[in-house]
Amino acid sequence: DTGVSQDPRHKITKRGQNVTFRCDPISEHNRLYWYRQTLGQGPEFLTYFQNEAQLEKSRLLSDRFSAERPKGSFSTLEIQRTEQGDSAMYLCASSPRGSPYEQYFGPGTRLTVT
Amino acid sequence: EDQVTQSPEALRLQEGESSSLNCSYTVSGLRGLFWYRQDPGKGPEFLFTLYSAGEEKEKERLKATLTKKESFLHITAPKPEDSATYLCAVSNNTNAGKSTFGDGTTLTVKP
């Protein structure tokens, strides 16, 4: 098992462009989480899925953010009309069925909006 | 709203000098308290889950304890490779899938 993977690892985009990130969880993990982290801060919860169902979405998430997990395996996070304030590390995590609170994080995607 | 406060923000120790990190929390019905380690440029690495006051967990030089208001991460005889940011997080009974993180304590262990 290679752990949680995220693609791309780095993304530089211009303000106003749309970006999409992908997360592949550990196989057979049924829960998948998205977080955002800025320098010196802890991860900030964005949303999570149990299988293909999106069960919780942060109120901090604006309508420009959307996440999907269509077949209960990989997930995508899309940001539309990016703003400079969206610059951050976007982290994905997954947890196994028997231990939903043990979250295993991927390496993250670092987004820079210029 | 759940809140997590970690102290100190930064801690510098000599190799072998034991110390403790603090995590104070406010939560409406604690489901679990979690400790993670994060190295620069990497995602957090899960360390422990604590579920109820009085519970303790150990892993190598690390020991986590929990009371009704705070948790401590005790580091015994640390080594330079223990240098990292240690994050604390909580989840509540209403939204168990959502974790609220503190901003972490950055530990530096000098040889």
Image (tube, coloured by chain):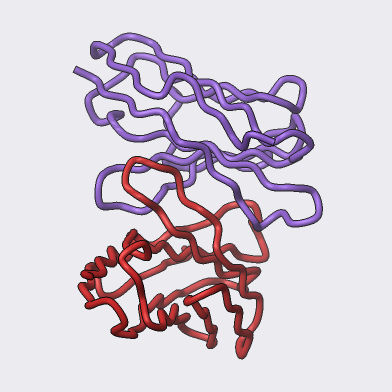
Chain colours: A purple, B red
Q: Is B30 rendered above or below residue A85?
A: below
Quarter occupied by residue B37: bottom left
Quarter occupied by residue B8: bottom left
Q: Tag count in the figure?
A: 0
Q: Residue at x 63, y 85 (%)?
A: B55
Q: Nearer the viewer, residue B38 or B9?
A: B38
Image quadrant in which the C terminus of chain A is located: top left
Q: Is A59 rendered above or below residue B102?
A: above
Horizontal side, residue B84 vs residue A44: left or right: left
Q: Position of residue B36 (x, y in %)?
A: 48, 60
Q: Nearer the viewer, residue A83 or A43?
A: A43
Q: Residue at x 56, y 29 (%)?
A: A5
Q: Residue at x 36, y 35 (%)?
A: A89
* Residue farthest to the bottom, as pictured: B54
Q: Position of residue B30 (x, y in %)?
A: 61, 73
* Residue farthest to the front, as pictured: B111
Horizontal side, residue A32 vs residue A72: left or right: left
Horizontal side, residue B111 vs residue B92: left or right: left
Quarter occupied by residue B31: bottom right
